[in-house]
Image: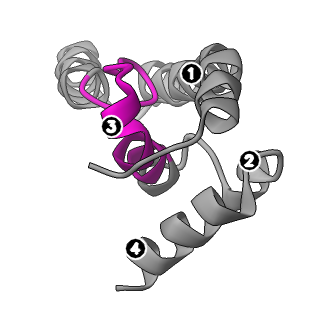
């Protein structure tokens, strides 16, 4: 859909694993809060956690289809999910960052 240069593509492939690990670590922390919530019954904790996991496992921060043609859309998803910030894109080309900014402003 959006053309990306080779350097940006290689950089994404290098960074994605770390980004996903950090995102899933954050999710795990949130899951622990659900399990530690003393106001919920055990069954409520179970079903709340199950619902969260069902939704979260669809996130790009958890599972990503690594295709060059989807790179910009994947980055947008990661940003929208909070898996990464614009600061995480600092090593990418100005052209790619500008594309991302333009799309997010629309």
Q: Could you tell which of marks 2 and 4 lies nearer the N-terminus? A: 2
Q: Nearer the viewer, mark 3 or mark 1?
A: 3
Q: Is residue 47 above or below residue 39?
A: above
Q: Nearer the viewer, mark 1 or mark 4?
A: 4
Q: Secondary structure at mark 4?
A: helix
Q: Going by the image, does 94 lie left or right of 36?
A: right
Image quadrant where residue 25 sits: top right
Determine which residue is flagged by label 3: 70
Q: In percent of the image, x 36 and y 18: which residue is there?
A: 63
What stretch of residues is rendered in magenta?
58-78
Q: Secondary structure at mark 1?
A: helix
Q: Going by the image, does 57 lie left or right of 16?
A: left
Q: Could you tell which of marks 3 and 2 lies nearer the N-terminus? A: 3
How many numbered discs? 4
Q: Is residue 101 above or below residue 100?
A: below
Residue neighbourhood size for the residue with mark 3, other residues' Cα within 10 Å, grouped as few (<14), some (14–19), many (≥20): some
Q: Nearer the viewer, mark 2 or mark 1?
A: 2
Q: Secondary structure at mark 2?
A: loop
Residue neighbourhood size for the residue with mark 1, other residues' Cα within 10 Å, grouped as few (<14), some (14–19), many (≥20): many
Residue 81 lies within the magenta run = no
Q: Which mark is residue 20?
A: 1
Tell me where residue 27 appears, x and y as whole percent.
51, 27
Q: Is residue 66 above or below residue 103?
A: above
Determine which residue is flagged by label 2: 92
Name the residue furthest bottom.
Answer: 106
Q: Going by the image, does 91 lie left or right of 103?
A: right
Q: Which mark is residue 103?
A: 4
């Amino acid at each position: 859909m959006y053309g990306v240069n080779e350097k940006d593509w290689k950089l994404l492939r290098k960074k994605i694993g770390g980004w996903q690990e950090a995102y899933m670590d954050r999710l795990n922390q949130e899951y622990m809060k659900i399990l530690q919530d003393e106001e919920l019954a055990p069954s409520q904790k179970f079903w709340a956690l199950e619902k969260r996991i069902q939704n979260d496992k669809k996130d790009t921060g958890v599972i990503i289809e690594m295709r060059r043609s989807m790179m910009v859309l994947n980055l947008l998803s990661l940003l929208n999910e909070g898996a990464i910030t614009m600061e995480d894109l600092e090593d990418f080309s100005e052209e790619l960052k500008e594309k991302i900014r333009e799309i997010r402003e629309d």
